[in-house]
Amino acid sequence: DVTSVAPAGVVLDFSGIAAGGLLEGDLAEAGRFAGQALTAAQARGAPEDTAASFSLLGDISMAHGDLSGARQEFQQALQIRQTLKHENSIAESQAALAAVSIEEGKAPEAEHVLRESLVEFQKEHATMDEIRAETDLSRSLLGQGKLADARKAISAAIALSRASDDPSLTSPVAIQDARVEAAELESSPSSKPTLAEPRRKLQQAILAARRLGYYGIECDARLALGELEMRLAPAAGRSHLRDLANQAHQRGLDLVARKAAEFQASAVARSGQGAVH
């Protein structure tokens, strides 16, 4: 009964199961156990555990594609942490809100917040948080067309992640690295840039995630690969993204599903405009 006062270990157990469910793409299990972690933390009167549970619920809402719900949950975590005056945790919540801003199309806003959070992570030697923030900073910069800055940020994440053997941390870095590399190759003077290397990196990321059962990361890598294939072989890319959108939606991973469908539709629209002209 999670409504009674539970020991701290129970909260951690619930949170661990929820985080595992999120990685594996089982959002129903993740949401159920994250909710139990929140209830247990609140019953214990443990504000930091309560904030961590709200943050985990925000990650789950993000995967569901519920950006407003994710923002609300990350904001609740932030408010608790501001009351506690835990500067690194405050920066963590602000970085999570910046990730929502990226998905909302507010890349400049996200960039500003992430740069501020990185100052705190670097001061506290919070390496895992720094890796995630550098990766998201690269995403926000690439979305603004700031290619050199995007490379600088992801290179920092790569350097920091070399000592890590946690695929949940290193795989998103590899996916973003491949995206930046593809953009760099396409911006080069060569009329027909080869995208074989970023394609290989994404295929490796997919295989590694599949081997571990990390379906959420597998879908993120498949999305990046589908975007790449749309430029190499549009018919194959459309098929890849269509399959991904359907499969991710069936698992409730509607953020990836929506992005796959939107990228496919926008690419088809661009090709149609090209045919007209």
Image: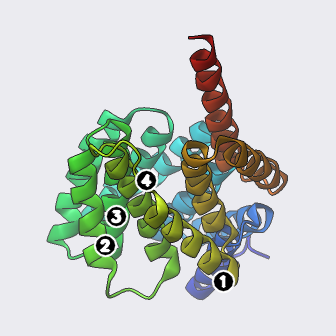
Instruction: Assign a secondary structure to mark 2.
Output: helix
Instruction: Measure how far apart labels 2 and 3 are at the Cα level.
Output: 23 Å
Q: Nearer the viewer, mark 2 or mark 3?
A: 2
> Please, what is the three-letter code of the amino acid marked with disc 4?
Ala
Q: Nearer the viewer, mark 2 or mark 4?
A: 2
Instruction: Measure how far apart labels 3 and 1 are at the Cα level.
Output: 29 Å
Compare residues 181 and 27 and report the one nearer the observer: 181
Whichever of callouts 3 and 1 sits on the residue coming sooner in the sequence is 3
Image quadrant occupied by the N terminus? bottom right
Whichever of callouts 4 and 3 sits on the residue coming sooner in the sequence is 3
Count of numbered circles on the image: 4
115 lies left or right of 20 = left
Q: Position of residue 274 (x, y in %)?
A: 57, 19
Residue at mark 1: 212
> Please, what is the three-letter code of the amino acid marked with disc 1?
Leu
Instruction: Assign a secondary structure to mark 3.
Output: helix
Whichever of callouts 2 and 4 sits on the residue coming sooner in the sequence is 4
Residue at mark 3: 89
The residue under the point 30% across, 62% down is 154
234 lies left or right of 70 = right
The residue under the point 58% across, 81% down is 12
Question: Is residue 84 something one can see in this rendering?
Answer: no
Image quadrant occupied by the C terminus? top right
Q: Position of residue 140 (x, y in %)?
A: 35, 44
